[in-house]
Amino acid sequence: MLIHTRELVKLYRMGGSEVHALDGVSVDIDEGEFVAVMGASGSGKSTFMNVLGCLDRPTSGEYVLRSQKVSELAGDDLAVVRNKHIGFVFQQFNLLARTPALENVALPLVYAGVSGAERKSRAMAMLKRVGLGERTDHHPAQLSGGQQQRVAIARALVTEPLLILADEPTGALDSRTSLEIMALFQELNRQGMTVVLVTHEADVARFARRILVFRDGKVVQDEHNEAVAARGGETALASA
Amino acid sequence: MNFLALLRIALRALAVNKMRSALTMLGIVIGVGAVIVMIAVGAGAQARVEEQIRSLGSNLLLVMPGSTTSGGVRMGFGSGSTLTEDDVLAINREIPEAIAAPALRGSAQVIWGNSNWSTQIYGTTPEYLDVRQWPLVSGRTFEPAEMAGAAKVALIGATVAKQLFGAADPLDQSIRIKRVPFTIIGVLDVKGQSMMGTDQDDLILVPIKTARSRVLGTASAARNRTVGTIWVKAADGIDTKIIEEQVRALLRQRHRIQAGADDDFSLRNLQEVMAAQEASSRVLALLLAAVASVSLLVGGIGIMNIMLVSVTERTREIGLRMAVGARTRDILGQFLVEAVTLSLIGGLIGVALGMGTSLAIAELAGWRIVISPQAVGLAVAFAFVIGVFFGFYPARKAARLNPVEALRFE
C-alpha cells in the first residue's frame, strides 16, 4: 500500500461558517496505480490533492505515505517529504522564467543537496526520458506549451518520487497536445510510476485505470476504468 | 542548499530587472559614497588640525598685554605695554616646569642683493626656539654675548630663505633690514600654516634688544624693556592649566594687582583653543554622519520596498520552490541573499564613487583627504547590515507563505 488515508477532514472557516472541504475521506492507493480524481469545482478534489502532496495538512484524520505517517508532520518535515517522494505537475507548468530547461528540471535536486555535476546528469536523463534531450538550454519562453509541460514532468520525475501528482496537467493545452501529455503519463505508469491526476474532464480521466469522484468533500464514486484496464491506453487514445 | 547556489539565484533574479535593481541600489550607493567622502574629508581635517598642533608646539600658553584705554576708547588686548623682559626672566626663574620667551613683533622690508621681501620681524631670545619646538636646518642660534650686545644677527624662516635666496645658501650672508645690515647665522625648519592659515615660516628672528633698538623700537621702548607677547611652554607631562595658574599668580604679584582687580594681561591656553576647534570639527563630522545615516536608512527602506514587490511578484515561484522541497530557511536565505547582494553591490559602487569624489575634492578644492581602509570596511559592513536588516522582513514574508495559496496566486 502506497497511500493510506482514514477519515481525512479539512475544515475552512469562511466568514463565521465552517466549510468541510474534506469530510471523512478514506482512500487507499497501491503502488503502480493510475488514479484520476474528478469532481466539480468546490467538490474537495483539489484539497485532497494538496493533502496527498503534503502541501496542506488535514484538520483531522490519518494519512500514511508508504510507512510514514505524514499527517503528523508539519513545516520543513513536509518539505522534505515533498522533495523526496512527490513529483508535482501543474496546470500552468510553473517553470522558472528565463531559466534553461535543464536547470528547471534540476531544481528539486538543488533542495535535496545533490552536487552540481550529478544534478546535471540526472536532469539530462529525465529530459531525454520525456523526449526533450535536444532542448536542454531552451528557456520556457522558447518552448511550446506541450514542451513546457514535458519539462515540468521531467522535473517531477527527477527525484525518483513515489508518486506523481498532476493537477489539471492538460488544462492549458490544446486537445492534440493534451493527448500527447496523457500518453506520456500512461507510459510512465506502465513503467511502474504511480500517477494521481486531478481533472474535471472525462476525456482526460479516461486514461486512468481508476476514477475517484468527489462531491461535497466526500468520495461518492470509486471505480476501475474497465475499458482501460481491459484494453490498455491505446484504446483510450483512439477513442478520445 | 549552499551559499553559491543562493548567490546564483539572487544574481539571476536581479539581472531580470536590471533597471529596477540599479535604481534600488542607488540609495545605498549615495549613502555609502557620502559616508566615504565624509570620513575622508573629516579625517583629512582632523589630520590638519593635529598637524597644526604639532607645528605650533604643544603645551603652549600665550601671554599678551592688557588693554589700554585712551580717552574712553578701550583698545583691546595687546595694545598696552604691561609685559616686560623681566616678567620673562621671572617666569623662567620662578616656574621650573615652564620655559618662557618674549616676542616683539613688527614688519619690515628685507633686502639681499637684487631681491627684497616684506616679512615679520620677531625680536626674541634663544628660548623661543625651545618654546615653539622649532629646530634649525642649518647654522646656530643666538649666543648670550649677541643677546647682551644687541648684535646684528638673524635667523630666517624657510619662506624668507626661499624668497630672498632661492637655491643659494643664506648662511653668513648679509641682509639689510630697514637698511641695517644683519648677518644670517641660521635657517629655521619648515613649520607650515598656522591655525589661522598664515604662513609661519614667513619671519625673521633677531635678538630682542637688537629688534628694539635697530628695527622696531623707539627710544622710549628701548628703555622700558616692554615686550609684545610672552610665549610659555609647559614641560611635557605637566598640565598646562597648572602652569597657567602659576604664570597668572606670578604676573599678578609682579604687577602688584590687588585681589579682585582685573589682570593687566591676558593669558590664552592654546591647547584649549585647539581642543575646542577639534571638538567643533567632531561635531561637524557627527552631523555629516547623521546625514549619511539618513540616506543609508532611506536606501535600506528602498531595498525593503523593492524586495516586498519582488516577493509578491514571485509568489508562484516561491510556491513552486516550496512544492519541490524548499524549506523555510531555503526561501528565507534566497531572499535575504538577494537583498544583501543588492546592498553590497550598491555599497561597493558607493565606495568606488566615494573614493573618486574624495580624490576629486582633493584635486579641485585642494582639501586634505584621508581614505582609511577602516572607513571603507565600515561602509561596506554598514551596507551589509542594511541588506540583512531591511531584507529580513520581506524574506520572512516569503518564507512564511502558505504553499497552497502561493501556487494558486495570480
Image (cartoon, helix red, strand yellow):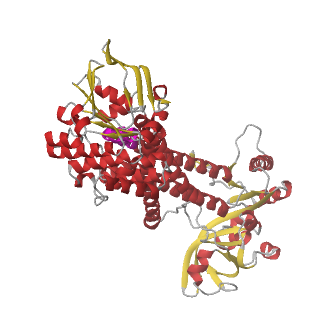
Q: Quadrant of the N terminus of chain A?
A: top left
Front residue of B161 and B369: B369
Q: Is residue A27 in view from this perspective?
A: yes
Residue A16 higher or lower than A198, as above or below: above
Q: Residue at x 82, y 73 (%)?
A: B144
Residue B358, image x, y percentages: 46, 61
| Left-right relation of B123 to B344 | right
Range shown magenta: B302-323
Mainly helix, strand or loop, the magenta region? Answer: helix
Residue A184 in magenta stretch: no
Which image quadrant for residue A18?
A: top left
Residue B55 higher or lower than A49, as above or below: below
Residue B312 in magenta stretch: yes
Q: Quadrant of the C terminus of chain A?
A: top left
Q: Quick one: which residue is furthest to the front in this view?
A: A230
Q: Residue at x 44, y 56 (%)?
A: B350
Residue B406, image x, y percentages: 33, 34
Q: Is residue B178 in view from this perspective?
A: no
Front residue of B143 and B81: B143
Which image quadrant for residue B402?
A: top left
Residue B96, image x, y percentages: 85, 56
Residue B337, image x, y percentages: 45, 47
| Left-right relation of B374 to B364 | right
Q: How many marks?
A: 0
| Left-right relation of B173 to A160 | right
